[in-house]
Amino acid sequence: MSKLSSNAVSCSFVIALFNIHCLAIAGITVTSKFFYTILHYAKVGGLPLAKLNQLELQFLLNDFHLIISSAEM
């Protein structure tokens, strides 16, 4: 597990228009794993299972800095 988490942390994930669906499906998977298996979410999201596993780990281990400066407001 530590190898998986170190790989997930070392990969940077830049949010862009062409990959925002990956972040969305990873978030949905994390929040609703109670209902379906991760394989189901991978199929629905059109992602390979290994990629969704990596995205899920990245999502869980990522420290989102969601701060908006006053200049950006």
Image (cartoon, rainbow, N blue to C red):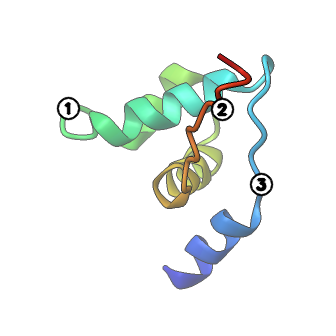
To which residue does mark 2 refer? 69
Labels 1, 2: front one: 2
Residue farthest left in this picture: 34
Is 10 rendered above or below residue 27? below
Figure disc tally: 3
To which residue does mark 1 refer? 35
CA separation in Å, label 2 and label 3:
23 Å
Residue, x 45% and y 35% (percent of image)? 27
Residue 26 position in % (x across, y down)? 50, 37
- Look at the numbered disc 2 and give the secondary structure of its residue: loop
To which residue does mark 3 refer? 12
Labels 1, 3: front one: 3
CA separation in Å, label 1 and label 2:
38 Å
- Look at the numbered disc 1 and give the secondary structure of its residue: loop
Whether residue 30 sits left or right of residue 46 in the image: it is: left
**Image quadrant for the C terminus?**
top right
Residue, x 66% and y 32% (percent of image)? 69
Q: What kind of residue is marked 2? A: Ser
Q: What kind of residue is marked 3? A: Ser
Please tell me how crowded label 3 is: few (under 14), some (14-19), or many (20+) other residues with Cα within 10 Å.
few
Residue 37 appearing in the image:
no
Nearest the camera: 27 or 42? 27
Whether residue 15 sits left or right of residue 59 in the image: it is: right
CA separation in Å, label 1 and label 3:
29 Å
* Contact check, label 1 and label 3, Cβ < 8 Å: no
Q: Earlier in the sequence, mark 2 or mark 3?
A: 3
Nearest the camera: 22 or 51? 22
Residue 2 position in % (x across, y down)? 53, 83
Is 62 rendered above or below residue 70? below
